[in-house]
């Protein structure tokens, strides 16, 4: 409208955009608000990463977001997932990809806090590129959809997380008036994982075996590397490990839910409960002890190594076997992907996941190939070349296979496991140990459908009975843990179609096994380090060179390594043995350590030179096994006492380099 020589515009809403105080005309080609809406995630990630260079708290939040969410969200843009699949696939993919990214960047630039944060900047750049090509990475308009998730579902998964977290916080790095407790299921293997994490964060990269110094690490240690990455940006944080384990148990539950969900919501809930907490009839021992007033948290533990109830329950494994916390969810999501071999993208994604999991869990790698073999057989009549797309990305594992990662695997036809560990009638043994879900899984074979799960279950169950793939025969039991995933889903699906009251009763009778596991973990107090030993470990971190080698007794708990992050000549024998170190070599180191502590000065000097020992440790284990060793060491001129508090001593080796 014109009034005089002026043009008066109608008083309609202002369509100009405003961003950071700048006005943008209506006809601007790219309004700033639209730019922000499209790239909001990139901006957020950039701000978080920048703040992480200055704040350890911001860094801890940032590293959690990048290692559990960002890579999976980005990759999910290129595949079609159901909503219930996203919750499992995103964290699984994120852990796999982020750990690999930091690993390869650390090979190039060195493993450090800065390398980790710069890898996040690289992921932020990828996020920006994806947003540029495909639009908003995670549309803000989708946030209200989260509210549509039922409260019952949220409560269900929250309970799984909280139960796991409470048990772990009470059994892993639990502090009492005497010191540090690592107890229950975790007393034996968890100290090994602490040694890996702390040595990685104290200069041991690319890693040697911290508990078998001088030997390249070929063990599937990447779950510990993932933990080390989170701790590295913050500093020493041992309580991070139980928290992360609880998160990964939740991810396992979500992966089972995604696998079982096509059979219905009830089937998926039943399957998750069985998968996480179900097992066999070993709780009879607990009930008997309670009935006769003979209960003891430490004595009535339901797992009996080498005896009738000789297969540890799945929840027991989830609490202590850290590589399984990645291996099992990966196996579940790969099964979910291979259900539809006609979808080329899902087949490719399954191959990518399998290629990335090798260094996290070798048995998972094999189990996924078993699932692929079954999928091929089921589709053989209508075979397509696209099925083999699975094989192409799985070559991602080759660098680790060729560098010795397969050295701990011995492939042979053998009945060593049942011959050594199956007690009594094999049928009764497996029924008693694997219980009601195992029986239901066999019954479900006569029903139509779920053929991938059925075939995979049968083969995984047969493998430990017919083959030997691990240096330590006992480790073949892990194939039963992987077979438990199809067992849980098959039995959960079957029970979902029965009377609700009967189904709930059978599930209750299955999960009672985990009650004993919880009692054992929260009701025992096995010391891992006294207050003085903890202080010694911290002194080692702050006052000895990184990658120093300590001479210690071949014990489970060793403060210089578990807390101090240094390497030692030898640990508890089963750790290196289960990872492919020849038993004869381990026995030689045991003999040399005995000779060093009990023998002459010349014996000690030879052992020090052989293993490049920088420090000799005398703690409670050393004094118990080698009485008087400290007095002998005090008389040796080239051993300099650098730490002495109470009965704990550290001697620095002061020999010429050619000594």
Image (spheres, rainbow, N blue to C red):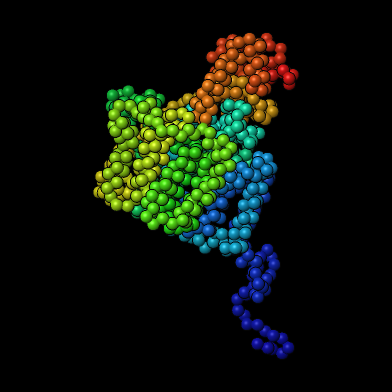
Q: Is residue 261 above or below residue 654?
A: below
Decide if residue 459 is in sight here.
Answer: yes
Q: Position of residue 114 (x, y in %)?
A: 68, 43
Q: Residue at x 61, y 42 (%)?
A: 103
Please give left or right for residue 412 compared with residue 529 in the image: left
Give the number of callouts: 0
Q: Residue at x 32, y 45 (%)?
A: 491
Of residues 341 and 47, the one drawn nearer to the viewer in this rendering: 341
Of residues 235 and 596, the one drawn nearer to the viewer in this rendering: 596
Q: Residue at x 55, y 36 (%)?
A: 405
Q: Point out the image quarter for the C terminus.
A: top right
Q: Is residue 542 above or below residue 351?
A: above
Q: Position of residue 655 (x, y in %)?
A: 72, 18
Q: Position of residue 471 (x, y in %)?
A: 48, 29
Q: Quadrant of residue 589?
A: top right
Of residues 473 and 276, the one drawn nearer to the viewer in this rendering: 473
Decide if residue 181 is in sight here.
Answer: no
Q: Quadrant of residue 461?
A: top left
Of residues 78 and 579, the one drawn nearer to the viewer in this rendering: 579
Q: Residue furthest bottom?
A: 4
Q: Quadrant of residue 226?
A: top right
Please give left or right for residue 211 compared with residue 276 in the image: right
Q: Point out the image quarter for the N terminus.
A: bottom right
Q: Position of residue 327 (x, y in %)?
A: 47, 41
Q: Residue at x 57, y 39 (%)?
A: 402
């Amino acid at each position: 409208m014109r009034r005089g020589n002026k043009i008066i515009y109608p008083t309609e809403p202002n369509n100009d955009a405003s961003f950071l105080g700048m006005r943008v005309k209506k006809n601007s080609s790219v309004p700033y608000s639209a730019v922000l809406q499209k790239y909001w995630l990139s901006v957020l990630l950039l701000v978080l990463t920048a703040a992480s260079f200055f704040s350890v708290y911001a860094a801890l939040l940032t590293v959690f977001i990048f290692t559990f969410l960002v890579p999976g969200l980005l990759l999910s843009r290129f595949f079609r997932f159901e909503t219930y699949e996203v919750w499992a696939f995103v964290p699984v993919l994120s852990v796999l990809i982020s750990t690999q990214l930091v690993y390869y960047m650390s090979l190039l630039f060195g493993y450090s806090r800065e390398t980790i944060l710069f890898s996040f900047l690289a992921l932020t750049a990828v996020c920006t590129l994806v947003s540029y090509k495909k639009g908003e990475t995670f549309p803000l308009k989708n946030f209200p959809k989260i509210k549509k998730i039922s409260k019952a579902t949220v409560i269900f998964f929250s309970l799984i997380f909280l139960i796991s977290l409470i048990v772990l916080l009470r059994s892993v790095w639990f502090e009492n008036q005497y010191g540090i407790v690592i107890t229950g299921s975790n007393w034996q293997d968890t100290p090994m994982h602490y040694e890996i994490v702390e040595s990685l964060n104290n200069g041991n990269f690319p890693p040697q075996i911290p508990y078998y110094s001088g030997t390249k690490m070929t063990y599937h240690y990447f779950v510990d590397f993932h933990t080390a990455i989170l701790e590295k940006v913050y500093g020493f944080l041992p309580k991070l490990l139980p928290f992360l384990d609880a998160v990964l148990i939740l991810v396992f539950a979500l992966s089972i839910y995604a696998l079982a969900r096509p059979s219905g919501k009830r089937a998926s809930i039943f399957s998750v409960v069985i998968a996480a907490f179900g097992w066999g009839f070993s709780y009879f021992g607990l009930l008997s002890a309670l009935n006769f007033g003979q209960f003891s948290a430490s004595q009535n533990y339901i797992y009996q190594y080498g005896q009738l109830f000789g297969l540890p329950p799945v929840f027991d494994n989830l609490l202590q076997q850290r590589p399984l916390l990645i291996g099992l969810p990966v196996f579940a999501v790969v099964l979910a992907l291979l259900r539809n071999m006609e979808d080329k993208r899902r087949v490719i994604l399954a191959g990518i996941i399998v290629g990335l999991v090798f260094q996290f869990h070798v048995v998972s790698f094999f189990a996924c190939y078993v699932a692929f073999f079954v999928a091929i057989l089921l589709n053989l009549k209508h075979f397509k070349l696209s099925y083999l797309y699975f094989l192409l990305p799985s070559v991602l594992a080759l660098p680790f296979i060729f560098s010795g990662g397969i050295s701990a695997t011995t492939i042979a036809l053998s009945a060593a496991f049942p011959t050594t560990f199956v007690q009594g009638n094999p049928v009764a043994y497996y029924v008693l140990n694997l219980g009601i879900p195992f029986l239901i899984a066999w019954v479900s074979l006569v029903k139509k459908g779920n053929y991938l799960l059925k075939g995979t279950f049968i083969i995984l169950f047969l493998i430990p009975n017919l083959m030997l793939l691990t240096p330590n025969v006992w480790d073949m039991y892990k194939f039963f843990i992987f077979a438990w995933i199809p067992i849980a889903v098959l039995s959960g699906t079957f029970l979902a179609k029965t009377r609700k009251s009967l189904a709930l009763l059978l599930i209750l009778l299955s999960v009672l096994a985990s009650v004993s596991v919880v009692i054992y973990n929260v009701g025992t107090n096995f010391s891992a380090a006294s207050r003085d030993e903890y202080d010694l470990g911290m002194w080692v971190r702050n006052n000895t060179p990184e990658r120093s080698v300590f001479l210690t007794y071949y014990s489970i708990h060793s403060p210089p390594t578990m807390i101090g992050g240094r390497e030692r000549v030898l640990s508890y024998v089963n750790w290196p043995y289960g990872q492919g170190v020849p038993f004869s070599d381990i026995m030689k180191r045991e003999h040399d350590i005995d000779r060093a502590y009990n023998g002459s000065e010349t014996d000690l000097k030879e052992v020090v030179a052989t293993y490049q020992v920088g420090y000799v440790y005398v703690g409670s284990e050393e004094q118990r096994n080698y009485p008087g060793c400290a007095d002998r060491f005090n008389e040796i001129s080239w051993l300099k006492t650098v730490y002495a508090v109470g009965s704990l001593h550290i001697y620095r080796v002061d020999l010429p380099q050619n000594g």
